Amino acid sequence: MTIDDHINSLIAESMQDFGASEALAAAGYYAHSLFFAHLVLEKLCKALWMKQMQSKDYPYIHNLIKLIKGQM
């Protein structure tokens, strides 16, 4: 897989997670919805990190600020 394939995969996964987040919120499961919303942001940040660093291996962290700043 190319870097772009990995990026597109993360974006596709984040879109599915966003749908889950919306469904959970609509059903009143707000804490669970926020968890999935965080997953959406994390995957998009990792896709951006991969694009900026031109690397298939993104850092295995959950800190969105560090991902956005390109820190590990």
Image (tube, rainbow, N blue to C red):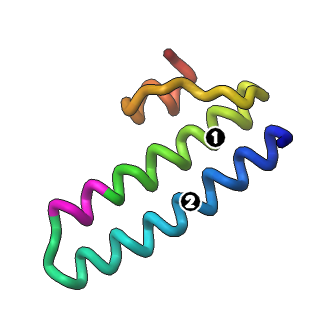
Q: Is residue 34 magenta?
A: yes
Q: Assess disc 2: are there few (<14), some (14-19) or many (≥20) residues with their C-alpha within 10 Å of its C-alpha.
A: some
Q: Residue at x 53, y 41 (%)?
A: 45
- State which quarter of the image contains the N terminus: top right
Q: Assess disc 1: are there few (<14), some (14-19) or many (≥20) residues with their C-alpha within 10 Å of its C-alpha.
A: some
Q: Which structural element holds mark 1?
A: helix
* Left or right side of 23 for 13: right
Q: Which mark is residue 17?
A: none
Looking at the picture, how far across and down is residue 60, in whole percent?
48, 26
Q: Type of residue at label 1? A: Leu
Q: Which residue is mark 2?
A: 13
Nearer to the camera, 30 or 2: 2
Q: Which region is colored magenta?
A: 31-35
Q: Type of residue at label 2? A: Glu
Q: Main secondary structure of the magenta part?
A: helix
* Left or right side of 1 for 39: left
Q: Which residue is mark 1?
A: 48
Of callouts 2 and 1, the N-terminal one: 2
Looking at the picture, how far across and down is residue 30, in whole percent?
16, 68
Q: Residue furthest right?
A: 2
Given this view, does label 2 or label 1 mark the residue nearer the observer? Answer: 2
Q: Is residue 30 magenta?
A: no
